[in-house]
Amino acid sequence: TLNSNTNTSFAALQELIDNTESGDTLVINQNYTYATGDSPITISGSVNVDFNGTTVSGNNQASTLFNITGKDVSLENVVVKDSTGSAIVSTGDNTKIDGLTAENIKGTVIDIQEDNTIINDINLNNHDTTGIKITGSNSQVSEVDAKGGSGTVIDVTGDTTQITGLNLTNHDGTGVKA
């Protein structure tokens, strides 16, 4: 499915995601920005969303950008920015996040609360809180670049998390807290 909507609100993106069949991939080709009254984007089905390098902005108003509640959800190639809280909160098993850049996120960038998560190719720019928080088990985190900021890059309290490829540049915080 290819996105061709001209409405750029969270509500419009939510409608596209809700209309994507389980197991299908939705390819996004435009930026989306929080508008007053929008809710966080909830992904409750087993879908893949490829943002194709586009941006989802909280417009310095949204407290959470994405709530992932479904199993087997994949987010790819997305820039998240300007959230007053977390960018992504996942309570669904088997979440995959591949290719994410975070800018101006005031809360935890990625908050994983369930099991079997794969997080790859993450760029955290000037974050002062937690970059990736994992309370679930059996997760893999690879290729994380943290530039600037003073927060904890990866905070793990769950069991069996494998971390490879962590790069810190001008970062004054903790790399990994376990």
Image (cartoon, rainbow, N blue to C red):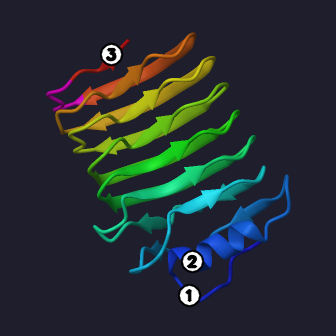
Note whether 9 is above or below 66 in the view shown: below
* Residue 148: x %, y % from top left: 19, 39
The span from disc 3 to disc 1 (Cα, nearest Å) is: 41 Å
Badge 1 density bin: few <14, some 14–19, many ≥20, Cα 10 Å:
few
Q: Tag 3: residue type? A: Lys
Residue found 48% across the figure and 48% down from its top: 88
State yes or no: discs 2 and 1 in contact (Cβ < 8 Å). yes
* Residue 163: x %, y % from top left: 49, 17
Q: Residue furthest bottom?
A: 6
Q: Tag 2: residue type? A: Ala
Q: Mark 2 highlights which residue?
A: 11
Q: Mark 3 highlights which residue?
A: 177
* Residue 111: x %, y % from top left: 46, 37
State yes or no: discs 2 and 3 in contact (Cβ < 8 Å). no
Determine whether the residue tagged by mark 1 lies in a helix, strand or loop: loop
Image quadrant occupied by the C terminus: top left
Q: Mark 1 highlights which residue?
A: 7
* Residue 15 within the magenta-colored segment of the rendering: no
Determine whether the residue tagged by mark 3 lies in a helix, strand or loop: strand
In the image, which residues are magenta? Answer: 169-173
Badge 2 density bin: few <14, some 14–19, many ≥20, Cα 10 Å:
some
The span from disc 2 to disc 1 (Cα, nearest Å) is: 9 Å
Q: Which of the two discs, 2 and 3, labels the residue nearer the N terminus?
A: 2
Residue found 38% across the figure and 80% down from its top: 36
Note whether 94 is above or below 17 in the view shown: above
**Res 120 label:** none
Nearer the observer: mark 2 or 3; the answer is 2
Q: Tag 1: residue type? A: Asn
